[in-house]
Image: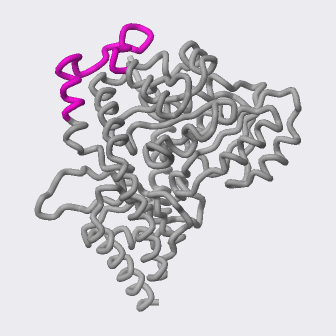
Amino acid sequence: MMPPQNPPTSPDVLKRRLEARLARQREDGLWRERLTMTPNPRAPLRDFASNDYLGLARDPRVAEAQAEGARCEGAGAGASHLVNGHRPAHHALEERLAELTGRPRALLFSTGYMANLGVLQTLCDQDTRVFQDRLNHASLIDGARLSGAPSRRFHHRDVGDLDRLMSRAPKDQAKLVVSDGVFSMDGDTADVEGLAATCQRHGAWLMIDDAHGVGVLGERGAGLVGRQYSTSQVPVLVGTLGKAFGSFGAFVAGDDLLIDALTQFARPYIYTTAQPPGVARATQRALDISEQEPERRERLQAHITRFRQAADTLGLPLMDSPTPIQPLLLSDNQRVMRWSRGLREAGFLVGAIRHPTVPRGTARLRIVLNAEHRWRDIEALLDTLAELQYREAQVS
């Protein structure tokens, strides 16, 4: 009797595909590394990479509010908002965010990514035409794709190009225009007034993701949009809480119609556990500090002005940005990584940004200023950047 033979082994196609993709990632100089940031009092890295614009993420008052919330209400919400996870802290925070942005209501989401997916999935389908700025955040691009809506991308900050594209769309088709408020990798800002006027001319809604503007820009930190533009001009306003406010989560602000629709239909809202109530309390404390200490925004703006003036004197290739995001355009991936290593050796942490986060040929160092930076540290960063530029010039 013949022994049973093992069946032929099928090729592991997924394994081979992943191995090939990872190999290409290394070869192209695009390998991403995750740093474990632990305090080192003997050799601290001066942080010019995070989005903690007002310096609230490590503020002891914010941390204590989160701890007190956990002591009173537990470490987690335990369920989604629509089951039994919606707590008084969440409700109070939504009311604060609506008041800050001058909107009738606001709705909390667990992350900014989920907020954008939820809005686009709720508002859009195959019968909706979406128009997006070419440099929009990945979550906005992904949200439109997942909604199944046909999308067109207009030239960056080019309202004329948007107008041309919208003129070609059927007049009776639902239309949504989507843009970052502050563009996260370039630091420049959307022409909200021009976008709003174009939308009204074509009967479209406008959605602004003001993740990097809320807390930093506008009166009381209301953001690029805030109370300056009404819900009729900007019906959909998205903001995050893990940047200027130093905590975690996101929100969508708008009128009753929008918030009711998101509550009923936004899958990333319905099918996700609510954020811990302690986090909501921490955000409320951060909002208090942001309102009571406007000097934080004033100090941050002074840092931006002085930094740009000094960088211009040194001949550093800064991009045009009026916000805390100050990109240094180096173009080449290898050059960006050399400068990044040089900065880290000198004690500075700065983001090295490459494709696909930014278009090919536009690799840059993403320098981020915050209100807690001391000028002597910013000056030391500038000196190091000037030294790196000098060494490079000597070699070439």
Can residue 141 be seen here? The reply is: no
Name the residue located 51 percent from the left edge and 47 percent from the top edge: 218
Closest to the observer, 269 or 88: 88
Give the image quarter of residue 145. Answer: top right
- x, y percent for residue 323: 49, 57
Left or right: where does residue 117 sit relative to residue 344?
right
Left or right: where does residue 368 sit relative to residue 142?
left
Q: Is residue 121 above or below residue 370?
A: above
Name the residue located 19 percent from the left edge and 61 percent from the top edge: 44
Left or right: where does residue 320 sit relative to residue 15?
right
Q: How is the image coloured?
A: one colour
- x, y percent for residue 321: 53, 62
Is residue 87 found inside the magenta-colored segment of the image?
Answer: yes
Q: Is residue 319 above or below residue 15?
A: below
Closest to the observer, 327 or 233: 233
- x, y percent for residue 214: 47, 42
- The magenta-colored residue range is 64-90
Closest to the observer, 153 or 189: 189
- x, y percent for residue 187: 52, 57
Q: Quadrant of the N terminus?
A: top left
Magenta stretch: helix, strand or loop mostly: helix
Give the image quarter of residue 369. Answer: bottom left
Give the image quarter of residue 138. Answer: top right
Tag count: 0
Name the residue located 32 percent from the left edge and 46 percent from the top edge: 293
| Furthest-top residue in this view | 83
